[in-house]
Image (cartoon, rainbow, N blue to C red):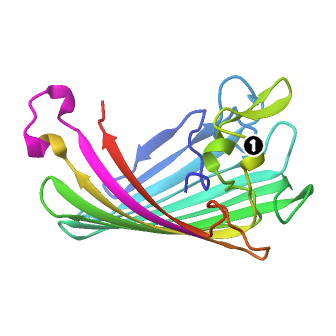
């Protein structure tokens, strides 16, 4: 999902609460050569896009629906459209059970594609994602969650692999360089991505009755995740060390401050 929607915006955002059920938001965004996505204050300040949306919440606060999106020109050098929308439905099935459904659609007009299917081809690119989350509180301090996602990078534009190398790319003396690894190892192609994650969230500070104030919100989260990829209208794709799938184990320590 991190490749399907913006990580940050630069600009202004205002929201207005109409009543207990409805909230609207909107504002201008700038500083980006990606239609307002992940901008800064040092470039593309002549390129302006917009962000807008709303949130509806039920009277009993058990259900909410959020819709928002961005729209604008790609950059100061391209008048092509860059846009996306994002929808999130949350519903408390029981006092201890939460269901979340999330959908994203993105469009980038007239982009240059270089991947395992296209070579120096300029065309529109689209991507789509559908995600489901289910959380259940086992106790006051322990909850379990499951997450499933389908993500289609329809034109091989948004999801390079390994992503950590591509995301760490900068221009150095006119040459693209990544501090996370060699760019020659990065591949991308039109593909469908599937993943399922199971997570345990343990509020360790509460369980262990830690008295240190800075540890009061400490949470420990073990995860197990399964990924699979299938090429979309292109040759077979094996980005996981020459495999189509992988299993990952991870352990997070979360300490808000």
Residue 94 placement, left or right of 117:
left
- Compared with residue 73, is residue 100 higher up or lower down, i.e. above or below? below
Residue 47 is inside the magenta segment: no
Tell which of 248 and 14 is nearer to you: 248
Name the residue nearer the viewer: 183 or 111.
183
Q: Residues within 10 Å of mark 1 (few under 14, many from 20)?
A: some
Q: Residue furthest bottom?
A: 233
Q: Where is residue 104 in the image (x, y as percent from the top left)?
A: 57, 62
Query: Residue visible at 65% across and 34% down?
Result: 39
Find residue 16 and report its image quarter.
top left
Name the residue at 72% across, 59% down: 107
- Say which residue appears at 60% left-offset and 59% top-offset: 85
Magenta span of residues: 206-228
Q: Specify the quadrant that holds the N terminus.
A: bottom right
Residue identifier under label 1: 183
Q: Which residue lies furthest to the front in this view?
A: 242
Whether 115 is drawn above or below 152: the answer is above
Q: Where is residue 170 in the image (x, y as percent from the top left)?
A: 73, 32
Q: Can residue 225 be seen in this view?
A: yes
**Residue 81 placement (x, y as % from top left):** 78, 53
- Residue 37 at what x, y percent from top left? 65, 42
Is residue 215 found inside the magenta-colored segment of the image?
yes
């Amino acid at each position: 999902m991190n490749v399907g929607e913006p990580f940050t915006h630069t600009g202004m955002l205002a929201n207005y609460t109409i009543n207990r059920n409805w909230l609207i938001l909107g504002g201008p965004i700038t500083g980006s050569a990606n239609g307002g996505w992940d901008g800064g204050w040092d470039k593309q300040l002549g390129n302006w896009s917009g962000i807008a949306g709303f949130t509806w919440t039920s009277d009993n606060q058990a259900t909410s629906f959020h819709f928002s999106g961005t729209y604008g020109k790609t950059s100061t050098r391209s008048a092509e459209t860059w846009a996306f929308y994002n929808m999130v439905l949350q519903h408390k099935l029981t006092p201890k059970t939460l269901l979340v459904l999330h959908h994203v659609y993105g469009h980038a007009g007239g982009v240059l594609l270089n991947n395992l299917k296209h070579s120096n081809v300029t065309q529109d690119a689209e991507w789509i994602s559908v995600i489901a989350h289910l959380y259940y509180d086992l106790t006051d301090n322990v909850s379990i969650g499951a997450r499933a996602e389908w993500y289609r990078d329809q034109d091989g534009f948004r999801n390079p692999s390994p992503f950590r190398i591509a995301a760490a790319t900068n221009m150095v003396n006119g040459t693209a360089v990544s501090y996370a690894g060699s760019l020659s190892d990065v591949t991308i192609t039109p593909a469908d991505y599937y993943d399922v994650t199971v997570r345990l969230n343990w509020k360790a500070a509460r369980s262990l009755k830690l008295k240190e104030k800075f540890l009061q919100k400490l949470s420990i989260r073990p995860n197990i995740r399964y990924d699979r990829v299938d090429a979309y209208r292109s040759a077979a794709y094996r980005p996981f060390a020459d495999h189509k799938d992988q299993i990952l184990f991870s352990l997070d320590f979360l300490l808000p401050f």
